[in-house]
Image (cartoon, coloured by chain):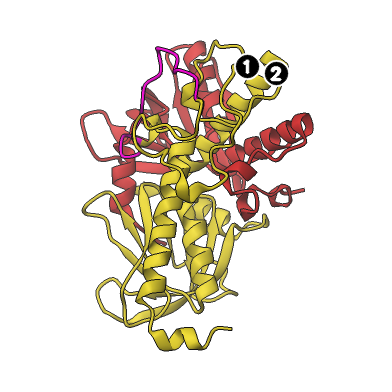
Amino acid sequence: MKLNERSLAFYATCDAPVDNAGFLYKKGGRHAVYHRRWFVLRGNMLFYFEDAASREPVGVIILEGCTVELVEATEEFTFAVRFAEARARTYVLAAESQAAMEGWVKALSRASFDYLRLVVRELEQQLAAMRAGGCPPPPRRPRALPPKENGCAVWSAEPPAASPGTSTGTSAGARSGPERPPLPPRRRASAPNGPLDSASFHQLHEWYGQEVRALRSQWLRSRDPMDRLLEF
Amino acid sequence: MRYNEKELQALSRQPAELAAELGMRGPKKGSVVKRRLVKLVVNFLFYFRTDEAEPVGALLLEHCRVTQEEPSGFSISFIEDPERKYYFECYSEEQCQEWMGALRRASYEFMRRSLIFYRNEIQKMTGKDPLEQFGISEEARFQLSGLKA
């Protein structure tokens, strides 16, 4: 497939602030050797360079349709970028510290264009509802509000994501919190494992967030107990 | 530059923002117009031979300029080489405008600017940061400082 590589290289090296940058070890495709590379995340593109001073990337990982997970490896602070597409390559990367790894996992899980589009749509709807209704609505899932409804619809005033770990909002149709008014008849429940397009932003965010938290606690449990003695 | 081609191919099969058969001419001197199925998915423009399942190529739409050409066509060029243009021919002025609008809004950077704009507007109206409820208000990618001056 032809690709406008010069434009890609420009996007990698242009002046604007990056979304994340740092050294990571990248496991080679064919061999088990890790190569230390300078990684730059910009938008939904993860570029990697020979080193921080290189003017052109060695390569790029396009971050659509992927999940980021921690992996069991002999190398510390390892995580993987895995794609839904079965034939696509999984990238195994290792950071140089716990903090760096967590930073990368967070940044990469939120890097897709799809995710950004969901956030933008959510804010667009909030703003439109505020302007139409003349009063700011409490934060709630966008799917619960049919487009033509008065922006001052009475929903639970409780912000849904205040304690994300306890929310059960990710299952289709499940409702959390007391005193929810009845749903308008046109609402369609959507599940997080349906097409990304139809999950509400809140559901999707919850889903990603839960996955990261679950993996993190798994990692915490699996660590060598001796490591914990080193913490203060 | 290496890239994950299989993932890009999979992306080309995702639901498109816009898709149509257009006339397309490459930037090289002397290239001719060819019929291509053109498909906009996230910030990529894929183009296929009309009878093939795999794209001939893809254009990443960051830092690009979309210009009207002739009666009902447009061109895409990139900031690092503005004279190098990809030309597209539409069947009507209306279709041309539709494509131009969609392509101008298709970049990640445009989305990011929109987000920052909405975030600011909502914050002005309510005094609250709308990203806080989702726990992403500190994300580097959503900061005002992320915009080029």
Q: Is residue B125 above or below residue B70?
A: below
Residue at image location 49% in from the left, 37% down from the top:
A202
> How far across and down, in percent of the image, does residue A77 sit?
43, 75
Q: Residues within 10 Å of mark 2 (few under 14, many from 20)?
A: some
Which quadrant of the view contains residue A216? bottom left
Q: Residue at x 67, y 33 (%)?
A: B118
Task: Determine which residue is flagged by label 2.
Answer: A131
Splitting the image into 4 quarters, where does residue B89 fall? top left
- Disc 1, disc 2: CB below 8 Å? yes
How far apart are labels 1 and 2 at the CA level? 8 Å
What type is the residue that disc 1 sits on? Answer: Gly
Residue A133 makes an appearance in the image: yes
For mark 2, give the secondary structure. helix
Task: Answer whether residue A201 is magenta in the image.
Answer: no
Q: Is residue B58 above or below residue B40?
A: below
Q: Chain of mark 1?
A: A
Q: Which residues are magenta?
A: A180-195
Disc 2 residue type? Arg
Colour in which chain B is shown?
A: red
Q: Is residue B64 above or below residue A34?
A: above
Residue A12 in percent (x, y) is at 55, 58
- Along the line of sight, the residue nearer the viewer: A169 or A199: A169
Shade of chain A as shown in the rendered figure? yellow
